[in-house]
Amino acid sequence: MSVTEKLKELGIELPGFNPPAANYSPAVRAGEFIFTAGQTPKQGGKLILTGKIGVEVSEEQAYEAVKTCAMNCLTILDYYAGGLDNIAEIVKITVFLNTEDGFENHAKIGNGASDLFVSIFGQHGCAARSAVGVSSLPGNAPCEIELVVRLKDASIPTKA
């Protein structure tokens, strides 16, 4: 089953692009790899949730916010890969979590991205992952993720 068919089966629609918040590209394609810029939980260019995990943001809210970040990455990848069906595998996920001191459940919240990618890409969505607590993120976002993916065919151009 193609990734496009899997998305339909799961009832997942890609969100629209969120414009970059500063002077950077949403992704860079280098040979058979795409590196995304960090994506926060935005919809329509606005953060849907702010605050520190464990203080203003619950672990359940943070898990869902990480999924939103992952969906934003998929939108970017769809364009830069020439379609999600050209993704061979998710290679690396980095999850940044805006947490209070002493927070320990980073891996549980990082699963918001991993669970989504495995549901879509199967074993090819089970990436190496780091989940890191930080003292702050842009706009007081609770989370941010970035990806490295490998393409099936590096000759397929980005979407027009």
Image: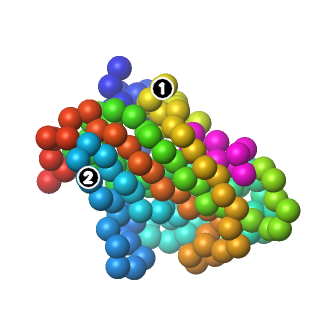
- Taking depth in this image into account, of 130 and 70 the one nearest to the observer is 130
Does the magenta portion include 71?
no
In percent of width and height, residue 88 lies at 34, 32
Specify whether 42 is left or right of 104.
left
> Label 2 belongs to which residue?
30
Q: Residue at x 50, y 71 (%)?
A: 46
Q: CA distance from mark 2 to mark 1?
A: 24 Å
> Label 1 belongs to which residue?
122
Q: Residue at x 41, y 48 (%)?
A: 148
Q: Which residues are magenta?
A: 106-114
Name above or below for residue 32 compared with residue 103: above
Name above or below for residue 86 compared with residue 21: above
Mark with earlier residue (2, 1) = 2
Name above or below for residue 115 compared with residue 17: above
Quarter holding residue 41: bottom right
Q: Secondary structure at mark 1?
A: helix
Specify whether 158 is left or right of 63.
left
In percent of width and height, residue 86 lies at 27, 36
- Is residue 17 in view? yes
Specify whether 125 is left or right of 107.
left
Does the magenta portion include 113?
yes
Residue type at numbered disc 1: Gly
Residue type at numbered disc 2: Ala
In percent of width and height, residue 83 lies at 26, 41
- Taking depth in this image into account, of 50 and 105 the one nearest to the observer is 105
Overall secondary structure of the magenta stretch?
A: helix
Q: Residue at x 61, y 60 (%)?
A: 96
Q: Residue at x 53, y 57 (%)?
A: 145
